[in-house]
Image (cartoon, helix red, strand yellow):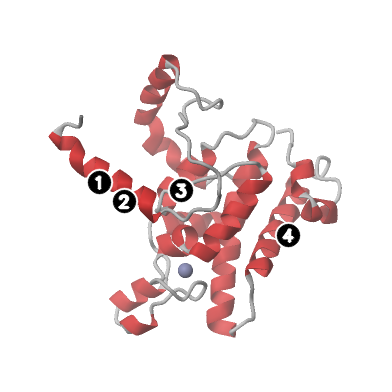
């Protein structure tokens, strides 16, 4: 039984579930994200409640994480603040008409920041493919800020977390690069190329940051799951 003030929250929750791009054929399960095991415990609830107050201040430390070049972190920062010149924003400013706002990747929906990086079905298949390497299946929260929070909070081992976090930035960088290549250079592209580009960028920066753990860039790209733990 819901309280009256919870009705809108429940509707939003159901709408989010219905709008999520399904990337797995597995059966949905309820999972408590406060514990790596996914099992609810009262102590983890108390810990999570205390941490919520610090979440706002801590969020930006996720963005300025010093894992990738500053220009990529800047891109993510602008995406969180919805300050990128995507087609919806250009249309608001009279630079494009509404018929020209379609996302260049899926050609189905308008290109907003949240659509381009999270909700686009093409992009989400790439995110899901990377998650599958880690045996994870995520549901897209729908907006960039929530997505980053849930990505960083994913149940990944401590030793693998740096690579997992770095991948987030390289995805953003690759998606933006591909989008610009399509629009300005009319480049040929495919979902396979997008994913390969992301893995290459992740491999490149992992090799640069952790040269001793990532022995071979080409080995990483051919089988990233084989070497996803680093010391930090
Ligand atoms: Zn799209």
Number of the label disc, if any, that sits on residue 211: none
In this rendering, the answer to whether 55 lies above or below 126 is above
Marked residue nearer the N-terminal end (4 or 1) = 1
Return the residue at label 2.
Answer: 15
Return the residue at label 4.
Answer: 200
Q: Nearer the viewer, residue 213 or 65?
A: 213
Residue lying farthest left?
Answer: 4
Q: Are marks 3 and 2 in contact (CB under 8 Å)?
A: no
Distance (Cα) linking label 4 and label 1: 40 Å
Return the residue at label 3.
Answer: 147
Q: Secondary structure at mark 1?
A: helix
Distance (Cα) linking label 3 and label 1: 20 Å
Whether disc 3's CB lies below 8 Å from ligand 1 is answered no
Give residue 186's quadrant in the image.
Answer: bottom right
- Residue visible at 41% across and 60% down? 114
Distance (Cα) linking label 3 and label 4: 22 Å
- Residue visible at 35% across and 50% down? 16
Please state if 228 lies on the left or on the right of 29 as rendered: right
Q: Are marks 3 and 4 in contact (CB under 8 Å)?
A: no
Residue 40 drawn at (x, y percent): 45, 22
Distance (Cα) linking label 2 and label 1: 6 Å
In this rendering, the answer to whether 136 lies above or below 125 is above
Residue 193 drawn at (x, y percent): 68, 69
Number of the label disc, if any, that sits on residue 11: 1
Q: Nearer the viewer, residue 145 or 78?
A: 145
Please state if 92 lies on the left or on the right of 87 as rendered: left
């Amino acid at each position: 039984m819901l309280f009256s003030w919870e009705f809108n929250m429940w509707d939003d929750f159901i709408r989010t579930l219905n709008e999520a791009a399904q990337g797995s054929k597995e059966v949905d399960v309820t999972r408590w994200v406060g514990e790596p095991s996914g099992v609810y415990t009262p102590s983890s609830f108390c810990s999570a409640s205390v941490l919520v107050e610090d979440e706002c201040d801590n969020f930006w430390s996720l963005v300025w994480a010093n894992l990738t070049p500053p220009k990529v972190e800047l891109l993510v920062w602008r995406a969180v603040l919805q300050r990128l010149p995507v087609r919806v924003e250009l249309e608001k400013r009279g630079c494009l008409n509404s018929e020209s706002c379609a996302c260049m990747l899926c050609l189905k929906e308008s290109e907003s920041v949240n659509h381009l990086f999270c909700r686009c079905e093409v992009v989400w298949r790439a995110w899901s493919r990377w998650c599958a390497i880690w045996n994870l299946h995520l549901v897209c929260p729908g907006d960039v800020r929530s997505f980053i929070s849930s990505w960083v909070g994913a149940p990944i081992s401590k030793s693998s977390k740096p690579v997992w976090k770095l991948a987030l930035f390289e995805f953003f960088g690759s998606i933006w690069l591909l989008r610009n290549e399509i629009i300005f250079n009319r480049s040929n592209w495919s979902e396979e190329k997008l994913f390969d580009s992301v893995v290459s960028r992740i491999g490149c920066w992992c090799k640069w940051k952790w040269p001793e753990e990532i022995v071979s860039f080409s080995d990483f790209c051919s089988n990233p799951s084989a070497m996803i733990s680093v010391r930090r």
